[in-house]
Image (tube, rainbow, N blue to C red):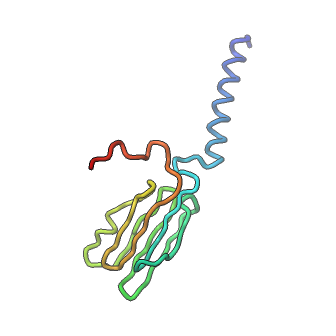
Amino acid sequence: MKRGDIGIALVLIAVVAWFGISKFMGEDGAAEGTYAMIEVNGKHYDTVALTEEPRDIEIRTERGYNLLRVSREGIEMVESDCPDQLCIGFGHVHDVHGTIVCLPNRVFVEVTGDQVEGSEPDAVVS
């Protein structure tokens, strides 16, 4: 090996180590400290971190049933017994200030915490 080959090998090792450490430390696009705050009928129900292992949250009230799924991708409404089913169409919500609302069952979910770089709005129109 020549001196230039050793330099290229060191650069490649540094790049691979950087990618490995960033994946190991959890830098997967979700901001550290990002949470979903869940309110039912105007009262705090639960606060869950979006970086934890996938889990389901069942909400049963006198108004109806909702099933939320929390994962690294965000939070989403996967089941609801409301008549219009609009809340299921929100998909994965992961950006700060993103919301899911089920009006008939009075379930409100908002993502709070640190913003991921690049997730802020491009423009605000008043």
Please state which of residues 36 and 59 is positioned toward the viewer in this rendering. Answer: 36
- Picture coordinates of residue 40, whole percent (x, y): 43, 78
- Residue at 49 percent across and 67 percent down: it is 37
In the shown orientation, is residue 51 left or right of residue 92?
A: right
Q: Quadrant of residue 107?
A: bottom left
In the shown orientation, is residue 47 left or right of residue 68?
A: right
| Residue extending farthest front | 126
Q: Quadrant of residue 76?
A: bottom left
- Picture coordinates of residue 92, whole percent (x, y): 41, 59
- Picture coordinates of residue 86, whole percent (x, y): 28, 69
- Residue at 46 percent across and 61 percent down: it is 111
Please state which of residues 124 and 87 is positioned toward the viewer in this rendering. Answer: 124
| Residue 10, above or below 73 | above
| Residue 122, above or below 57 | above
Q: How many marks?
A: 0
- Residue at 58 percent across and 62 percent down: it is 53
In the shown orientation, is residue 121 left or right of residue 74?
A: left
- Picture coordinates of residue 51, whole percent (x, y): 56, 58
Which quarter of the figure is the N terminus placed in? top right
| Residue extending farthest bottom | 62
- Residue at 35 percent across and 85 percent down: it is 63
